[in-house]
Amino acid sequence: MKSLRKILSSLILLVLVLILIFSHNAVGIFLISFKKIATSFFESCEKSEVFKVIEIENNRLKLELSALREEKIKSSLSQYRKARVYSRYPFNDRARLIIDLGLRDGIKEGMPIVLMPGVILGKVIEVKKNQSEVITLFDPEWRSSVAIGLLRAKALLKGGKEPKLELIPRDIQLKEGDDVLNISPELPMNFSLGSLNNLSEAPHEVWRTADLETNYNPEIIEEVLVVFDFP
Amino acid sequence: MSVKILNNFFWIVFIVLICFFLQETKILVIGGINPNLILIALLLIIFFQKDFFPLLFSLIAVSVIFLIFIKFWLISLLVLELSVIIFYLFKKFLTGNKAVDFLIGIILISIFYHIAVVSFSNYYFSIRLVLSEIFYNLIFGFILWLVVEKFAIIYEKRT
């Protein structure tokens, strides 16, 4: 009887293992949607009336923005190719993605990855037959040159969980919310990386520093675009 | 005290798979910090199993699962596995209290892992990130320790 139970439990486990192996994407999607439902339940409990009004306004703006973006994407489809995100780096020390395009699809090392046309997320650093590894600007190894605001103050973008802008000159007037645009030659010129936030004005320092605000959560990115006609 | 199911091939693969998916889908992320479930699972196997064989099998299972689902990031995984093996060899020099040694293991391996990864690549080391991860791992690891211990007691009573 005991051995029968052992065989049965082993068989059930084998089936579960096989299900997990062959439907890992579905399991992943299920877990993420479960998390979304759980978090939305708790969030909804805390919402105040004022917050709701702001949220409605925010949603309206988001819709407008997405319509504009869709229009933009349609007009430049030949330049980009959609890729789905397989996995994210499972440990905490890096922020990298695996996408479902590889050598067979014409992906090459260094190709820029954008979240939507004009918004840089990262670049391809390793290519295999059907998959590629992407380093994002949330990775501590990320370094690139940027221009901030209308006066185009040059600065260095250092990647990380909270990307930092360093070596910002003191003599150029900047304000929070100024656009941060790429000027590194390995990525498309003037593509957006985010906006300026928390600008430090410490008088004893030669350079200023700031945070880069990105307005999206890199943990929930499921699709990206690969820029094919660059450089 | 040992948990006999941790000696079972399918159970080890199943537990490792669950940890892998929970870690990779980042469902347990709080404040941008993901607990290192693979490390916690490997340490639990070390402390609830006397032999080296279940640990060795778990390490192989983790490597195979990574090779199947992700063909990248193997160096990071190998560093983590190496840290766990080194800890296994030196754990006898610790306090002797299993639960305390388990928590010490989480701290030591997390620090060793991050220092080793920094040495492999010249990336910047965030103390805040490492401390947050250790803190989260300790809380999560302790909860799992209590669950597995309870499970082991029930299992022993039944058999």
Image (spheres, grey):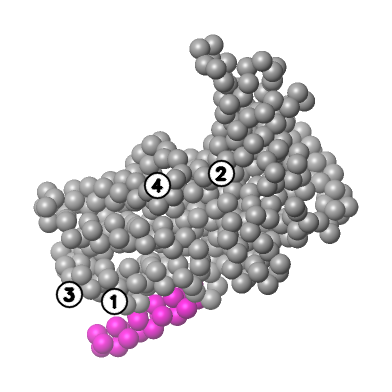
Residue at 56% from the left image edge and 44% from the top image edge: A142
Tell me which chain the residue with mark 3 is part of: B
Say above or below: A162 vs B16.
above
Q: Nearer the viewer, residue A94 or A151?
A: A151
Where residue A144 appears, x then y in whole percent?
62, 40
Magenta span dominant secondary structure: helix
User: Which residue has dot 4 on it?
Assistant: B118
Q: Quadrant of residue A228?
A: bottom right
Inspect the magenta stretch and tell me whether residue B125 lies in it. Answer: no
Q: Amino acid at mark 3?
A: Thr
Give how far across and how far down residue B157 sits, in percent: 16, 68
Taking depth in this image into account, of A17 and B157 the one nearest to the observer is A17
What residue span does the magenta drawing correspond to?
Answer: A1-20
Asked whether the viewer can see residue B135, the reply is yes
Question: Residue drawn at (69%, 52%), measured in percent from left and top?
Answer: A112
Task: Please state which of the two labelled residues, at mark 3 or mark 2, is closer to the viewer.
Answer: 2
Q: Is residue A147 above or below residue B75?
A: above
Do discs 1 and 2 share a chain?
A: no
Q: Which mark is residue A142?
A: 2
| Type of amino acid under label 1 | Asn
Residue assigned mark 3: B159
Q: Earlier in the sequence, mark 4 or mark 1?
A: 1
Judging from the image, mark 1 belongs to the subunit labelled B
Say whether mark 1 and mark 3 are on the same chain. Answer: yes
Both labels 4 and 1 in a single chain: yes
Numbered label attached to residue B8: 1
Tag in front: 4 or 1 = 4
Crowding at mark 1 (Cα within 10 Å: few <14, some 14-19, many 20+):
some
